[in-house]
Amino acid sequence: GVDVGDVDAKAERMQLPTGTDVAEKFVADKLLSKVPPAKKDSLASFITSLYRFYRDLHFAYLEINPLVMLADNTVVPLDMAAKLDETAAFICAQKWGEVDWPPPFGREAYPEEALIRDMDGKTGASLKLTVLNDRGRVWTMVAGGGASVVYADTVADYGWGHELANYGEYSGAPSTEETFVYAKTLLSLMLKYHHPEGKLLIIGGGIANFTDVAATFTGLIQALQHYAAEIKEHKIKIWVRRAGPNYLEGLRMVKAASDKLGLGVKVYGPETHVTAVVPMALGLQDPLPEADLTTTAGPPTRKLIPTAGSKKPANPKPSPPPSKHTIVTATPETRAIVYGMQMRAVQGMLDFDYMCKRK
């Protein structure tokens, strides 16, 4: 509401390349030519300190407007707006202290999401939960960040994206109690709304590296026992695919609990492809025989798809001679193209390279 004239014509600008430092004299000469000499040194000191503050705490944006300097050269910011780079948390979390990050998707967090986020902040494991559609029919409880993406994509690829209710993961060797609370929270969300056709819970994951599958499944079983009657009332079908340390014992425990509670849980191990349970759960494919829980299984085997006219040619062409370069080697000049930009994933890769001092 105040006519301040042409800001672009009046403003002094100073651009700095990323990663560079700046001296007070440079700021005074470049930016403060119109500032009274008595105030120039103090203001230059404030600006250089502010720049280092901005850089060291990994701000993505910072604006002070207006900025007032009193008669005693004290600087007073009257209004400020700033954004932190959340992907720098692994460097600056202790410096930042308690930061109240805005909820995702422009909405207030569900109480269940807030509970899991609070648990995640107090454990060395990784516990994530985002509700996409609280009335959806397809719910997932997936171990591992990569696997959670694969399962969500697979559900969407089969045309059930509109029914995908949540996205999240539990990984990093969560305790039995943490898994119990996570599974119980997920089931409580599933039971909020009744659907006449029932709902699906896909409990999946790849081959764990160090997570004790039996320990986490003990927590899962406790949650199933807690809600057994409601699960049957809401006609919830449960499909499990898991592998890793103690997976056989974990699957046996789940199957025994299912038989005792009458839940009809379908159980698969590493003999089944990681996402094979998805089309079976969605009713798009006949269920495969369940895992043989008497012995450990090998990797999944897949039969080749027979095709018409698949005879071998009588005189096959010889293979081309090996080329000189058979491996693509990345260099500092190599350009990577990331399809469907995932900022957190890309930033994680860059952070890893930076921490490893990779050149």
Image (cartoon, rainbow, N blue to C red):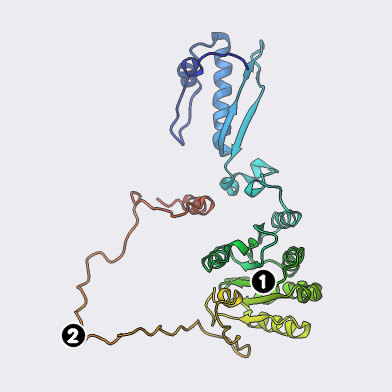
In the image: residue 357, left or right of residue 180: left
Residue 242, visible in the rendered structure: no
Q: Would you identify the image quadrant in which residue 286 lies?
A: bottom right
Instruction: Report the residue at 54% width, 76% height from top.
Output: 276
Identify the image quadrant of the N terminus. Answer: top right
How crowded pointer 1 is (Cα within 10 Å; few <14, some 14-19, many 20+) is rated as many
Between residues 95 and 246, which one lies in front from this camera angle? 246
Looking at the rendered structure, the kind of residue marked 1 is Leu
How crowded pointer 2 is (Cα within 10 Å; few <14, some 14-19, many 20+) is rated as few
Q: Are marks 2 and 1 in contact (CB under 8 Å)?
A: no
Q: Which mark identifies residue 315?
A: 2
User: Pointer 1: what residue?
Assistant: 201
Secondary structure, mark 1, is strand
Looking at the rendered structure, the kind of residue marked 2 is Asn
Between residues 13 and 229, which one lies in front from this camera angle? 229
In the image: residue 21, left or right of residue 78: left
